Image (tube, rainbow, N blue to C red):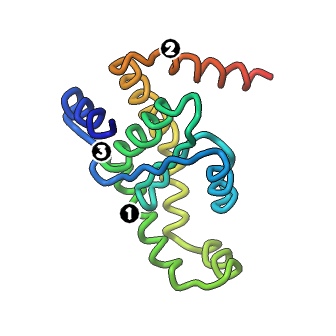
């Protein structure tokens, strides 16, 4: 399925996901993954550091793959901003690899220039990063005739935000 959708993207947009990976989780493993990595519980996440998408098998599973794997994957792999984010993440990961304790990592991060630049990149590009992924998710939902699930996902998100 991923290969077929990637081919649709290449046919329609002249670009494709090339380096990103996808991991799919059941509920129990998803909760463990989120707690282990200190992520807020959601239904998907993309980690630019290692070009990996992680998605919970849920009602909006396909839309979340479109968003995380294809949307964020394409952004990080192919936009100048995404490439910069990935590069800074790689530098930070290399620098942190020498640290042994959580305290060492915390102290290191307080004054690290790469982390400061990375935070600035995320801050400056968050809206583009998310809107790009939502647009890809929407376009793929149209192509795969799953627009109703896309609409339902975002309608339910808007309703839950209003309370």
The earlier-in-sequence mark between 3 and 2 is 3
Label at residue 148: 2
| Above-or-below relation of 37 to 54 | below
The earlier-in-sequence mark between 1 and 3 is 3
Please give the name of the residue rendered at 33% of the width and 20% of the height, measured from the top-left corner: 143
Please give the name of the residue rendered at 37% of the width and 43% of the height, measured from the top-left corner: 75
Q: Position of residue 10 (x, y in %)?
A: 21, 34
Disc 2 element: helix
Q: Position of residue 67 (x, y in %)?
A: 46, 35
Residue bearing mark 1: 87
Disc 1 element: helix
Calculate the distance from the C-alpha at mark 1 to the C-alpha at mark 3: 17 Å
Calculate the distance from the C-alpha at mark 2 to the C-alpha at mark 1: 37 Å
Q: Are marks 2 and 1 in contact (CB under 8 Å)?
A: no
Q: Quadrant of the N terminus?
A: top left
Please give the name of the residue rendered at 42% of the width and 43% of the height, measured from the top-left corner: 69
Label at residue 17: 3
In the image, which is nearer the foreground, mark 3 or mark 2? Answer: 2
Horizontal relation, residue 10 to residue 57: left or right: left
Answer with the quarter of the image where residue 33 lies.
Answer: bottom right
Q: Position of residue 42 (x, y in %)?
A: 64, 41
């Amino acid at each position: 399925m991923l290969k077929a959708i990637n081919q649709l993207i290449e046919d329609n947009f002249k670009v494709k996901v090339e380096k990103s990976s996808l991991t799919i989780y059941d509920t129990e493993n998803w909760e463990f993954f989120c707690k282990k990595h200190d992520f807020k519980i959601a239904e998907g996440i993309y980690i630019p550091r290692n070009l990996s998408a992680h998605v919970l098998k849920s009602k909006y599973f396909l839309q979340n793959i479109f968003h995380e794997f294809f949307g964020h994957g394409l952004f990080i792999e192919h936009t100048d901003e995404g490439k910069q984010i990935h590069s800074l993440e790689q530098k930070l990961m290399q620098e942190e690899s020498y640290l042994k304790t959580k305290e060492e990592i915390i102290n290191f991060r307080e004054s690290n220039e790469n982390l400061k630049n990375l935070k600035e990149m995320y801050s400056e590009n968050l809206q583009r990063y998310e809107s790009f992924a939502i647009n890809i998710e929407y376009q793929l939902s149209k192509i795969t005739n799953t627009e109703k699930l896309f609409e339902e996902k975002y309608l339910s998100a808007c309703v839950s935000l209003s309370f």
